[in-house]
Amino acid sequence: MDGKCDFPKEKSIQICEDRSKIRQDILIFISRPYFGPTVHRSNYKKNIQQQITLLQQDHIKMKKTKINTGILSFGMSGRVFHAPFVHTNPHFNLVAVVERSQKIAHELYPEIKSYDTVDQLLADDTITLVIVNTPNHTHFEFATEALKAGKHVLIEKPAVENITQFNKLSEVSKKSGKRIFFYQNRRYDSHFLDVKKVIESGNLGKLTEVSFRFDRYKMELGQKYFKENNQYISSGLTYDLGPHIIDQAIALFGKPSKFSKTTSINRPDSQVADYFHYHLRYPNELNVFLTGSLAVADPLPAFVVHGTKGSFIKTMADVQEQQLIDGMLPNNPSYGVEPNGSAGKLVTIDNTNQKHISYPLPHKGDYNLLFNAIYENLVNEVEYPITMDHIRWQIEMLSADNSI
């Protein structure tokens, strides 16, 4: 890095790598007990004050700057889960998208640039952040190219197919000085936020058993070739829905001491797994079960948590995906609000062995929290909540062989 803070005419953010050095110099000056003969106190103080001024000016400029963003695909993922947030979030600016065939993005976003290829978008030097939302098996290739092109990247799940790719991508990030963000939006589902709050409250006592499910009924094969073809490692339900609930378990409990994995194929003519089950073991005898299936006609509660002092049961009630598909924007007051009657059931046992039943007020789901976290990391150096370790553990579990 050359240490300069360059702001292109389009005002895309460039992270100043020398800010940490400036802060370090300030701390040295403040804590220094004396100055030797080669350091004149007044000159040193003046230099530090100048650096403080530069730091403050840089920070103010970044605060006023939007993060220029490009999206590599405008299928369902780009149209539903990314563009509406980049467009409405005041910290971001939707600059460009890749559309290889149909050019439809301009119908929703008249000012957007539509490129024919990924290379064209990566050559746009006004773009700072690139969202890699292409087919699963291309994530590693395109994320690598984006990092080498000097872009920060937000990668859709699954981030990569295996640990080898993960380690290589991490190394490219370090060498390029650009950051990797992982898109795990289900951390911000209303139902998961409810579960998280109940667990963190301690009202359930010592947790004994936790079960997360992601069930659907889809016996016909899907239209996306990369999800149904076993020539791709990242095909099938395990790599499709597995990243969601594996990440939720990791977000709450961290890395398991050990785990087992089972997958199976149940749909006629399917080449890929349409059922998965993980058993995660944690210290303190906590057992966590993660299950996904495409052959469940009557879904069970998605979240069941048992502890020594109570239980919490919650259905998959988040409405964000359907609202986005229906065209609602994230800045709509009704966005993310669960319908009446969807509250989870909390059962607790008091010291006299009496049972108490309540229905905690549901959270509002908000995937914008993920985009806000990216902004806070790039601008204010706040740690991004979905860490490299979290994704490393996830990929280890996704790519593991069946235990049975």
Image: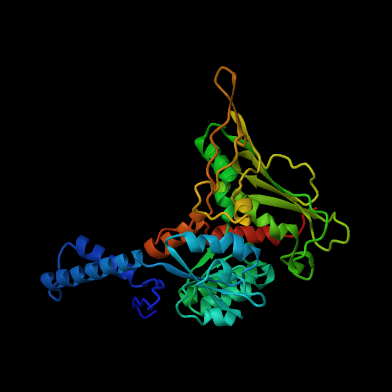
Residue 379, percent across and down?
39, 64
Q: Where does the image place residue 384, in percent across and percent down from the top left?
A: 47, 58
Whether residue 194 is visible here, answered yes or no, is yes
Q: Nearer the viewer, residue 53 or 113?
A: 113
Residue at the image point whose x is 35% and y is 67% from the top: 62
- Image quarter where the N terminus lies is bottom left
Observer-nearest of 10 and 129:
10
User: Does residue 300 lie above or below 107 as drawn?
Assistant: above
- The x and y percentages for residue 246 are 64, 52
The correct choice, above or below, for 109 with respect to 376 in the image is below
The colour mode here is: rainbow
Label tally: 0
394 vs 291: above or below: below
Q: Is residue 182 visible?
A: no
Q: Residue at x 68, y 69 (%)?
A: 135
Q: Residue at x 78, y 50 (%)?
A: 217
Quadrant housing residue 263: bottom right
Foreground pick, 286 / 271: 271
Image quadrant where residue 234 sits: bottom right
